[in-house]
Image (cartoon, helix red, strand yellow):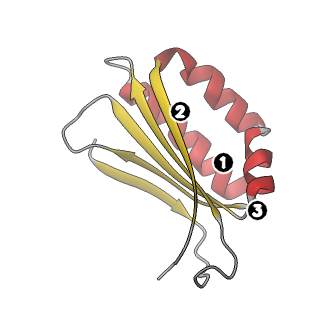
């Protein structure tokens, strides 16, 4: 699988007027688990955007070279919306399903500076 899955609630915001929280996650997976991981993260992404008013975007990306890596690009209205996401049943199910598949996980917290 190449490319990215994007689930989006489009709403433009101008630079710095209402900064949103971006969560960037890089997962390094156990060899051979990416297809199962992607199935779980796809359900989590769809549930997040469809069921959480503060989740604006949830992209799932994979490298073109086929490595056992998956990246997430998530946008939330604010910290409270992200914390609410972490308490949802679909996130809990995702986390419990994929924990054994993950070798390493890096998380970056960013703010959207400009949305063109």
Kindly give the residue lying farthest to the top in the view shown.
100
Image-quadrant location for residue 51: bottom right
Within-10-Å neighbours for mark 3: few <14, some 14–19, many 20+: few
- Tell me: residue 16, above or below residue 98: below
Residue matched to label 3: 53
Residue matched to label 1: 47
Q: What element carries label 1?
A: helix
- Tell me: residue 2, above or below residue 110: above
Within-10-Å neighbours for mark 1: few <14, some 14–19, many 20+: some
In the drawing, does residue 49 fall left or right of residue 100?
A: right
Residue matched to label 2: 40
Count of marks, rendered view = 3
Between the C-alphas of marks 3 and 2, the distance is 21 Å
From the viewer's perspective, is the residue at label 1 or at label 3 nearer? 3
Percent across and percent down for residue 76 are 67, 59
From the viewer's perspective, is the residue at label 3 or at label 2 nearer? 3
Viewer-proximal residue among 48 and 67: 67
Q: Earlier along the polypeptide chain: callout 3 or callout 2?
A: 2
In the drawing, does residue 91 fall left or right of residue 5?
A: right
Q: Earlier along the polypeptide chain: callout 1 or callout 2?
A: 2
Q: Which residue is drawn at 77% across and 40% down?
A: 88
Image-quadrant location for residue 30: top left
**Quick check: marks 1 and 2 in contact, CB under 8 Å?**
no
Q: Is mark 2 on a helix, strand or loop?
A: helix
**Quick check: marks 1 and 3 in contact, CB under 8 Å?**
no
**Quick check: marks 3 and 2 in contact, CB under 8 Å?**
no
Q: What element carries label 3?
A: loop
Between the C-alphas of marks 1 and 3, the distance is 11 Å
Q: Which residue is drawn at 18% across and 39% down?
A: 65
Between the C-alphas of marks 1 and 2, the distance is 11 Å
Q: Earlier along the polypeptide chain: callout 1 or callout 3?
A: 1
């Amino acid at each position: 699988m190449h490319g990215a899955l994007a689930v989006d609630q489009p709403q433009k915001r101008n630079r710095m007027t209402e900064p949103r929280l971006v969560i960037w996650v890089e997962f390094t997976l156990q060899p051979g688990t990416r297809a199962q991981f992607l199935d779980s993260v796809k359900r989590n992404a769809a549930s997040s955007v469809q069921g959480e008013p503060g989740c604006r975007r949830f992209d799932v990306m994979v490298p073109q070279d086929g490595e056992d890596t998956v990246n997430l690009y998530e946008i939330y209205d604010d910290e409270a919306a992200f914390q609410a996401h972490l308490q949802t049943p679909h996130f809990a199910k995702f986390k419990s399903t994929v924990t054994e598949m993950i070798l390493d996980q890096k998380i970056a917290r960013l703010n959207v500076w400009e949305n063109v």
